[in-house]
Structures are given as C-alpha cells and as structure tokens.
Image: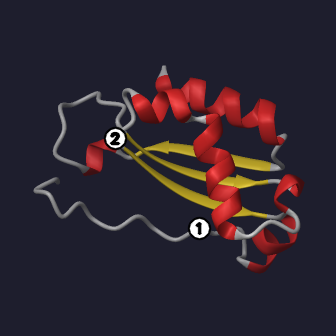
Amino acid sequence: MIQQTIEQKLHQTFNPTHLDVRNESNMHNVPPGSESHFKVIIVSDSFNGERLVARHRKVNSVLADELAGPVHALAIHTYTPEEWKKQSQLAPDSPNCAGGGK
C-alpha cells in the first residue's frame, strides 16, 4: 500500500522513464510484512542540470508525508536518462542491515 503511494507520487511528479520502488523492509529487523524501508531508483528528464542534493531534496519533498510517518528509511538513486544509460541501467545494491536484520 505504501509502496503504491510512493510509486504514484513519483510518477505524477517526475514522469520517469524508469521507476523502481523496492520494499527492502525484509532486509531489516522489522516484523514480517512491514513497509518501512524502501529503495527508489528513478530516471527522469526533470533531473537534467540538477545536482544530486537537489534531486534528493525534490524526492524527499514529494514523499514528505510518508517520511514523516511509516517510512523509516529511504535510499534514493536519481539519474537522468543519459546517466542511467552510462550506469548500464544498474543502481548500487543496498548494504546489509547493521542493526541485527537478516
């Protein structure tokens, strides 16, 4: 449910050419079925000319309600279409949880 909300908001705001929202809660020490840790990979022309910090601020702003509530952690990977192509359409893997997760 939260994952769908995140996807909808990011689609509406950034009109991405690629969007991958992953619920990574299972990688952490949280109850089964939790929606508290997410990874967002978003590719959009709206990031052209933007520094990384500005891109992340925009994503955080769009998801402010979720970050103020149920979302505990959000890994953000933002790319322009050209950057995404140079990345071979791959984002870095998330690190293992250091807090006693699985």
Residue 73 spot, x, y in % from top left: 38, 47
Q: Classify 75 as above or below 9.
A: below
Query: Relative to 98, is 85 on the left or the right?
Result: right
Would you identify the image quadrant in which residue 30 lies?
top left
| Measured Cα–Cα span from mark 2 to mark 1 | 21 Å
Label 2 vs 1, first from the N-terminus: 2
Query: Relative to 53, is 64 on the left or the right?
Result: left
Q: In front: 19, or 59?
A: 59
Residue 35 visible from this viewpoint = yes
Q: Residue at x 10, y 56 (%)?
A: 100
Residue 59 spot, x, y in % from top left: 64, 46
Q: In front: 67, or 37?
A: 67
Q: Residue at x 29, y 30 (%)?
A: 34
Q: Classify 53 as above or below 27.
A: below
Q: Residue at x 81, y 46 (%)?
A: 16
Quadrant for the C terminus, please.
bottom left
| Residue density around tag 2, few if under 14, some if 14–19, many if 20 or more, within 10 Å | few
Query: Relative to 79, is 56 on the left or the right?
Result: left
Which residue is farthest bottom? 86
Amino acid bearing label 2: His
Look at discs 2 and 1 and give the one toward the viewer: 2
Q: In front: 85, or 51?
A: 51
| Residue density around tag 1, few if under 14, some if 14–19, many if 20 or more, within 10 Å | some
Please give the residue where the numbered disc 1 appears in the rendered image: 91
Q: Secondary structure at mark 2?
A: loop
Residue 33 spot, x, y in % from top left: 29, 27
Please give the residue where the numbered disc 2 appears in the rendered image: 72
Would you identify the image quadrant in which residue 10 lies?
top right
Amino acid bearing label 1: Ala
Query: Relative to 84, is 98 on the left or the right?
Result: left
